[in-house]
Amino acid sequence: QVQLVESGGGLVQPGGSLRLSCAASGSIFSINTMGWYRQAPGKQRELVAGIRIGGSTNYADAVKGRFTISRDNAKNTVYLQMNSLNPDDTAVYYCNAQIATSWGLWRDYWGQGTQVTVSS
């Protein structure tokens, strides 16, 4: 069984920063891509940022230059540093990871979500 546990969400003023963390645990053989998605009220879930096992990254246009994704492979953890936050960043943020529990047995796993609210 695999679990993704997120932390670090909360309420922040416009212009502020938050750092999200997501730790994977359980019967993990290997982890490929890890990423963060978000879903605002009334909107579809969207990709925020992704990072491959080799370290290459990709970002949504809306967060480029403000958000930074990183990972610690030894800890099976992915981070999202969010700077210059604005109210449009308000959403539930979900961690996602492509995890193999044995050789060749890959599937997507999701965290439970963490609320990020940007408001004065």
Image (tube, rainbow, N blue to C red):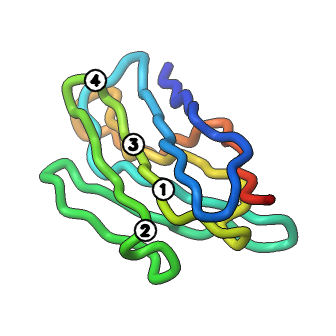
Residue 34 falls left or right of residue 31: right
- The residue at 50%/66% (across/down) is 48
Element assignment for label 1: strand
Judging depth in this view, the residue of 9 and 24 nearest the camera is 9
> Mark 4 vs mark 1: which is more N-terminal?
4
> Mark 3 vs mark 2: which is more N-terminal?
2
Q: Amino acid at mark 2?
A: Arg
Element assignment for label 2: loop
Whether tag 4 and tag 1 are in contact, CB under 8 A, the answer is: no
Nearest to viewer (mark 3 / mark 4): 3
Nearest to viewer (mark 3 / mark 2): 2
- Marks 3 and 4 sit apart, C-alpha to C-alpha, by 11 Å
Whether tag 3 and tag 4 are in contact, CB under 8 A, the answer is: no
Q: Which mark is residue 66?
A: 2
- The residue at 57%/31% (across/down) is 7
The residue that disc 4 covers is 75
Q: Position of residue 23 (x, y in %)?
A: 43, 28
Whether tag 2 and tag 1 are in contact, CB under 8 A, the answer is: yes
Judging depth in this view, the residue of 26 and 67 nearest the camera is 67
- Marks 2 and 1 sit apart, C-alpha to C-alpha, by 6 Å
- Marks 4 and 2 sit apart, C-alpha to C-alpha, by 25 Å
Element assignment for label 4: helix
> Mark 4 vs mark 2: which is more N-terminal?
2
Judging depth in this view, the residue of 65 and 80 nearest the camera is 65
- Number of residues whose C-alpha sits closer than 10 Å to that of mark 1, classed few (under 14), some (14–19) or many (20 or more): some
Nearest to viewer (mark 4 / mark 2): 2
The residue that disc 3 covers is 79
- Marks 1 and 3 sit apart, C-alpha to C-alpha, by 10 Å
- The residue at 55%/28% (across/down) is 5
Q: Amino acid at mark 1?
A: Met
